Image: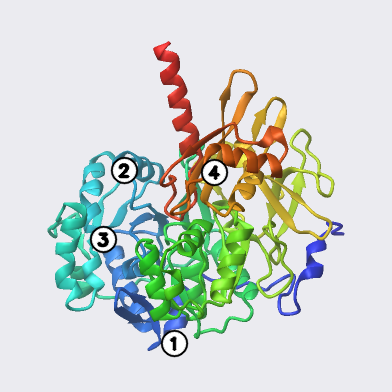
């Protein structure tokens, strides 16, 4: 008998069942289904160019057939090293059709990072932008890579943008790359012209066969390949579809700023859009003014994002000039959503912005606030259907009391199969009965709403006190002159660690360290107040907009080591 308590089920609206029936079929089947149901409907918009679902399906088959002709077998890994563009969608589904496993690769990777990922994953082929071709070619001799497929942004631009783009690219990147077709280098446009499109069907066991190797950020060591099956990704996408129960199939327009090489963008934008037959508005990089223009012209209804994206838009000097009223729902992930940002964004758009929670290892979403129901500010919400969660005490292998801070552990059909070729690391976080230790510190209230306090590794211990950076950051974000803030622990000879704040001021602000110190002392306990402030023009971030706290910690360590060596 299941005696596990799930108080969050009481808050589910009638439209969201507590348990769902999931399709046990390959992820790529949804593209074929949408091509049949919405063939001539626009699937995506990209810098003036539009493609239908039938076109995307046809080109995915052409590429899948070519991959098989070049020796791709079931289970072989293929890397996609692309920003959000039509090729990133086509390549993803083509690899799955051909029986391969997608390895998403950040286009910003340097050669050392790319070489590590290609070796660790055993990737056989890579699909990359022309400007990234030199990196791929340089690492190829030291990795299992056999083939490089090259495409360019211009390949899907309308006339005359396609003719002008190479000149823009040369000015932007000071490079103009023109790879030639050879036995191991393949040109995207040539593939679509010469491929037969005859794909040999590959039998897929959705619950066992991998669709994706998604590498973790590597902020605490070497990145690990997270093994996600077709079923993991299908169920998380179907959970998202039910959570967004007011959204209509074939009618929504989704703003695709979140990169598809990040699992959040992949699931909440690409896979969900394809499953529902929605139109995606693809943006290869984030530019606040360009985003505002695109929202006004393309009228997106759904806008999954990250706090830094919403913050940048809210602080744009011309924000009031643009009409953002088409936006109906946004789920924010990847970092804590400050309450002030949530309220201001909803005021501007009249849409709903709620915070969610998830990890690469969970495909990614496990929790979210209700978009059209009860939500709790400061909370990441309640577990999704068929998802269990609880708080574990750090010092003992037992469940914590209501309201007590401990480690968040989760269980559900979206939890990964494990880490690629790392059984020991897998065993450390994934129990035999399916509970996954997230490494995040949090608490649960009596109603089943969860609160993320911080990463276990980010907790600051100063003078014997436990300090959670998020708590201090929330206070700083409430200050009217602060645009962004991040808290880190830095070494201190007396307290062990002390609290340092990195601040990005709003345009025109002249706030001082002394004023911030006084403000913090009025709002939080003295031991949590930052002892050091550093003002910066910008903060280091991942491609999805998550502030790289560990980068700042490493900077502080290097400064300290430099001082010690001088002494």
Q: Report the front residue among 181 and 491.
A: 491
Looking at marks 2 and 4 on the same chain, the residue that comes earlier in the sequence is marked by: 2
Q: Which residue is mark 3?
A: 70
Which residue is labeled 4 in the image? 486
The Cα–Cα distance between marks 2 and 1, rounded to whole angstroms, is 39 Å
Image side of residue 280 versus residue 460, left or right: left
* Closer-to-camera residue (441/271): 441
| Secondary structure found at label 4 | strand
Q: Report the front residue among 360 and 54.
A: 360
Q: Secondary structure at mark 1?
A: loop
Dot 2 and dot 4 residues touching (CB under 8 Å): no
Which of the two marks, 2 or 3, is nearer to us in this view? 2
Dot 3 crowding, Cα within 10 Å, few <14, some 14–19, many 20+: some
Say whether disc 1 or disc 4 marks the residue closer to the N-terminus.
1
Circle 2 Cα neighbour tier, 10 Å, few/some/many (<14 / 14–19 / ≥20) = few
Q: Position of residue 136 (x, y in %)?
A: 25, 48
> Which of these two is toward me, 40 or 305?
305
Provide the residue designation for mark 2: 110
The answer to whether 221 is drawn above or below residue 373 in the figure is: above
Q: Which mark is residue 38?
A: 1
Say left or right for 371 vs 285.
right
Please provide percent x and percent y for residue 352. Answer: 61, 72
The percent coordinates of residue 292 (x first, y second) are 41, 71
User: Which type of secondary structure does the marked residue at label 3 adopt?
Assistant: loop
Foreground: disc 1 or disc 4: 4
- Is residue 555 found left or right of 22 in the rendered image? left
x 16%, y 57%: residue: 170
């Amino acid at each position: 008998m299941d005696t596990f308590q799930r108080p969050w089920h009481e808050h589910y609206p009638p439209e969201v069942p507590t348990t769902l029936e999931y399709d046990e079929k390959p992820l790529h089947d949804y593209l074929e289904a949408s091509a049949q149901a919405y063939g001539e409907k626009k699937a995506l918009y990209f810098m003036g160019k539009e493609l239908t679902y039938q076109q995307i399906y046809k080109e995915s088959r052409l590429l899948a057939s070519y991959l098989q002709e070049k020796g791709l077998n079931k289970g072989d890994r293929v890397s996609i090293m692309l920003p959000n563009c039509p090729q990133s969608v086509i390549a993803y589904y083509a690899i799955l059709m051909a029986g391969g496993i997608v390895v998403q690769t950040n286009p910003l990777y340097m050669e050392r990072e790319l070489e590590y990922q290609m070796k660790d994953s055993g990737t056989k082929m890579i699909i990359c932008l022309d400007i990234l071709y030199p990196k791929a070619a340089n690492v190829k001799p030291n990795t299992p890579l056999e083939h490089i497929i090259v495409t360019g942004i211009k390949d899907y631009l309308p006339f005359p943008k396609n003719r002008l783009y190479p000149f823009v690219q040369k000015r932007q990147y000071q490079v103009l790359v023109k790879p030639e077709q050879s036995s191991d280098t393949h040109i995207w446009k040539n593939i679509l012209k010469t491929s037969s499109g005859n794909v040999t069907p590959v039998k897929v066991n959705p619950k066992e066969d991998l669709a994706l190797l998604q590498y973790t950020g590597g902020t605490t060591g070497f990145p690990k390949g997270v093994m996600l099956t077709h079923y993991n990704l299908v169920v998380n996408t179907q959970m998202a579809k039910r959570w967004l129960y007011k959204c209509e199939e074939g009618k929504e327009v989704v703003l695709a700023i979140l990169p598809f090489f990040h699992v959040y963008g992949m699931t909440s934008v690409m896979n969900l859009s394809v499953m529902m037959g929605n139109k995606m508005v693809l943006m290869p990089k984030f530019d606040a003014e360009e985003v505002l223009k695109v929202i006004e012209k393309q009228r997106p209804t759904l806008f999954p994002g990250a706090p830094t994206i919403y913050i940048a838009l809210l602080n744009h000097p011309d924000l009031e000039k643009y009409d953002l009223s088409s936006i109906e729902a946004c789920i924010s992930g990847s970092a804590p959503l400050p309450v002030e940002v949530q309220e201001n964004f909803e005021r501007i758009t009249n849409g709903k912005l709620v915070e969610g929670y998830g990890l690469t290892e969970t495909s990614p979403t496990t929790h979210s606030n209700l978009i059209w129901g009860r939500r709790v500010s400061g909370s990441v919400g309640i577990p999704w259907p068929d998802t269990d969660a609880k708080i574990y005490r750090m010092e003992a292998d037992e469940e914590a009391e209501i309201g007590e801070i401990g480690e968040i552990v989760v269980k559900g059909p979206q939890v990964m199969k494990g880490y690629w070729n790392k059984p020991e690391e897998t065993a450390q976080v994934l129990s035999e009965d399916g509970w996954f230790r997230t490494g995040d510190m949090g608490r649960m209230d009596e109603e089943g709403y969860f609160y993320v306090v911080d990463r276990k590794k980010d907790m600051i211990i100063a003078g014997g006190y436990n300090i959670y950076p998020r708590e201090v950051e929330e206070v700083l974000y409430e200050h009217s002159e602060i645009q962004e803030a991040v808290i880190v622990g830095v070494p201190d000879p007396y307290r062990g660690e002390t609290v340092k704040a990195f601040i990005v001021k709003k345009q025109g602000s002249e706030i001082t360290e002394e004023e911030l110190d006084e403000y913090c002392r009025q709002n939080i306990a003295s031991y949590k107040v930052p002892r050091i402030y550093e003002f910066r023009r910008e903060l280091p971030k991942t491609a999805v907009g998550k502030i790289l706290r560990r980068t700042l910690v490493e900077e502080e360590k290097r400064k300290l080591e430099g001082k010690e060596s001088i002494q």
